[in-house]
Image (cartoon, rainbow, N blue to C red):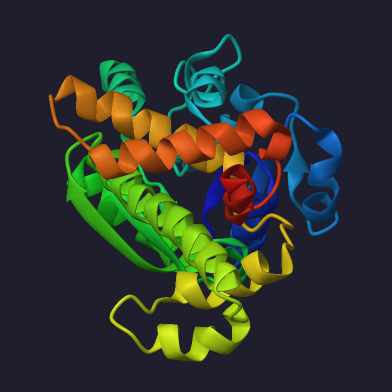
Amino acid sequence: MSLSIAFIGLGAMGSRMAANLIDAGHTLRVFNRTAARCEPLQARGAVVCTSPAQAAQGTQFVVSMVADDVASHEVMLGEQGVIPIFSGQAILDCSTNSPTFAQHAARAAAARGLAYLDAPVSGSLAQAQGRELVFMVGGPAAAYEAAQPLFAAMGRQATRLGESGSGASVKLVNNMLSGITNAALAEAVRMLEAAGIDPLQALPVLAEGAAGSRLMRTKIPKLAAREFSPQFQLALMDKDLRYLLEWAARMDCPLPVATAARLQMQAARRAGLGDQDVSAVIRALG
């Protein structure tokens, strides 16, 4: 069954997710602040709109994939935002936002009788391209069930974790683990190099150890080559760790290892590396 969907935010991840919805037979109305990013989808039949509100008009679902709380606030609650005018089944906010924002947006939606799902994703460009994303969802169970065709078109797994804000919370924990691991891998590569060992030669051994992971297999080659074309931008990881630590502070939950990783990401961002891959954190080590 074809669904009418507004898709907002056509960056590296969003453009791939939106294309997969078209591939699944759904009809799209799209908005992006840089209009040129809409052109490939327009060529495939998507209707290009001039605001989030215009994109949401008359649709059954809204999907948003933007950078942060500030952008999400503009999309959801701004002068031309979605929540004041939407009348469909559910809003899926796939952005990595703070739980505080997710809960605020959910309350604003509920005041209008709308369902808002915080539904951030795990996965990078390859997973977005290949419909392999994993959705972490918070919000009403009925809306989660109604959105299953969208999750199936864009990913391989969707899990409802609880009420509003729970998806955003688990996403921050997920990215905490990724941020800590990236920082640790940078130190591991520097240590191997200091010992005169080729990190690529060590990788097959390390990948079979207890800490072996997909992240290790993808990031050690980038670290060894100092090749930092972005799979996940360092500035976004810095932002996610900041959101995590702010949320943890509200709950009086100390996170010393995450704090150390965030200091490394912050130093790298301040050194002008924010638009590079998160593995560029190695440059903050001197």
* Number of marks in picture: 0
User: Which residue in the rendered view is the most extreme toward the left?
Assistant: 252
User: Which residue in the rendered view is the most extreme toward the top?
Assistant: 79
**Nearer to me, 1 or 51:** 51
User: Which residue in the rendered view is the most extreme toward the front?
Assistant: 195
Q: Is residue 247 left or right of residue 71?
A: left
Q: Is residue 62 left or right of residue 114?
A: right
The answer to whether one can see residue 117 in this image is no
**Nearer to me, 253 or 81:** 253
| Relative height, residue 163 to residue 278 (above, below) | above
Q: Is residue 223 left or right of residue 161?
A: right
Q: Where is residue 240 in the image (x, y as percent from the top left)?
A: 43, 37
| Relative height, residue 51 to residue 29 (above, below) | above
Tell me the residue at 72%/33% (across/down): 272
Q: Position of residue 179 (x, y in %)?
A: 43, 50
Tell me the residue at 73%/69% (across/down): 225
Tell me the residue at 52%/59% (across/down): 186
| Relative height, residue 114 to residue 216 (above, below) | above
Tell me the residue at 62%/81% (across/down): 198
The answer to whether one can see residue 134 in this image is yes
Q: Where is residue 85 in the image (x, y as percent from the top left)?
A: 49, 19
**Nearer to me, 134 or 271:** 271
| Relative height, residue 182 to residue 137 (above, below) | below
Picture quadrant where residue 103 is located:
top left
